[in-house]
Image: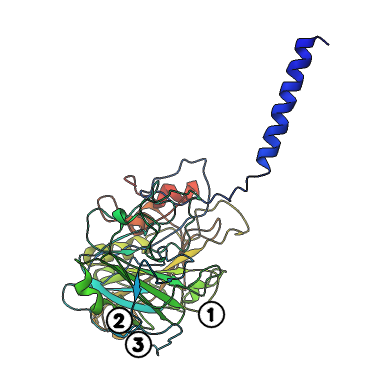
Amino acid sequence: MSDAADQDRRAAQAFRDAFAREAETVHPAPLQVRRASRRRWVPPVVAAAAVLLIASTVVVTLRGGPGDVGSATVQPGATGSADPSPEGVSSAGTDPGLAPAPGPPPEGWRSVTFRDVAVAVPGEWSDGAAPDQAWCVDSSVPAGTGGYVAVDSTLLGSAAIACGSTGAPVPEGFGPDPVAGWRPHLRFADLALAGTEALQDGVTTYQGWTLRVRTLGTVQVALVTDEATEAVASSVMASLTRTERSAEGCDTRSPVQAREQVSPESDGIADLRPEQVERVALCQYLRGSTEGPGLMGAQVVSGEEAAGLVRAIQDSPTGVGPETCADGAEAGDSAVVLRPFGSGEDAGPDAGLDTGLDTGLGTGLGDVHFYFASCAGNGFDDGSVRRQLTRDTCARIFGDPGTADRVFWTTLAARTARVCVPPNR
């Protein structure tokens, strides 16, 4: 071997040894992917689990959820001050009794329900995702400076990216992004979920910002306000209540939460006259356990839109599909209950049961279970007939072109995406 070749060999070995020594000092964190702020249809070659989150629309609706309360505990100190008693903020573990339904919100406000906790927020508060540690590369916080309600991030991952921050440290709980990027918002956390740690109940202030935290049952609510939104904080926190049914008419617990697919206890909607349907409540649930409340979000579609949705389901082919496997091993993490309501007169076999949106106590005209995130068994089940997903049905629920988003998703099986995701998503 020549001297030059031998020198090259030794240099290469020295490089490998140095690289190996450096690698031993690095402890990489696992990468989790958070959905982009805008959803796009996946190519036909992609097949993965779908994630649904129903958005808020007219009247009193929801797109609420854990947001990113995170695992931090508020520790007021040199950078903030705490007052544990204002606005009747309860201590951790407070478990008031369940009300049949939330009371009507003030004029110009809307009702938001997550799991079995309802709260009223100003009607102009839009919906978006609270920032996490990847705030610098991914954010779907709505534009503007007003308040918003954080969408449910239970099923969403987060990119393991340290964006960093400028300025002095702030009390934990306000969020990971710098003060310049803060926005007033309301967010929830389900403390029953593994890995979710609670903040400390109470009030923390920092440079004109206030964080209020209250726990009801297993749900923790966090409200962040600035000087411009502080005036509504007391009313928001005072409206907190535990409930058995949302203002839209969605039960906070549902059999559809089960890991296996179940049929509703209903005679079906085949004989229901669509023109007599005034509205349809769309109720999304987290699947996997029926032991506790699983409501993740609710929405109401009304008028001709509601009638058209019922008519389209009735006209769908019987059976199940789209399917990409035979055994249904991929059950999906969420499912939806569609609950039609009528005028109370001649709307169908159960018309007399409807008491309307005002009380939230109506049982509707017959539930329909909507499964879309499995690799088998997708479709509509009204208790009597199972029907396949079509573009005329599934795309209406996901959000027709020109309408507000109704479904937040990461990726879908290609066959499902073709019929469920509108072209403009």
The image quarter in which residue 407 lies: bottom left
Distance between mark 2 and mark 1 Cα atoms: 22 Å
- Kindly indicate whether the residue at mark 2 contacts the one at mark 3 (C-beta within 8 angstroms): yes
Distance between mark 3 and mark 2 Cα atoms: 8 Å
Q: Nearer the viewer, residue 216 or 406?
A: 216
Residue that numbered label 1 is attached to: 291
- Mark 3 or mark 2: name the one nearer the start of the chain: 3
Identify residue type, mark 3. Answer: Pro
Mark sitting on residue 360: 2
Residue 262: x %, y % from top left? 53, 72
Distance between mark 1 and mark 3 Cα atoms: 19 Å
Residue 408: x %, y % from top left? 39, 56
Label 3 sits on a secondary structure element that is: loop
Residue 198: x %, y % from top left? 47, 73
Identify residue type, mark 1. Answer: Glu
Residue that numbered label 3 is attached to: 100
Label 2 sits on a secondary structure element that is: loop
- Position of residue 128 relative to residue 112, above or below, is above
Quadrant position of the N terminus in the picture: top right
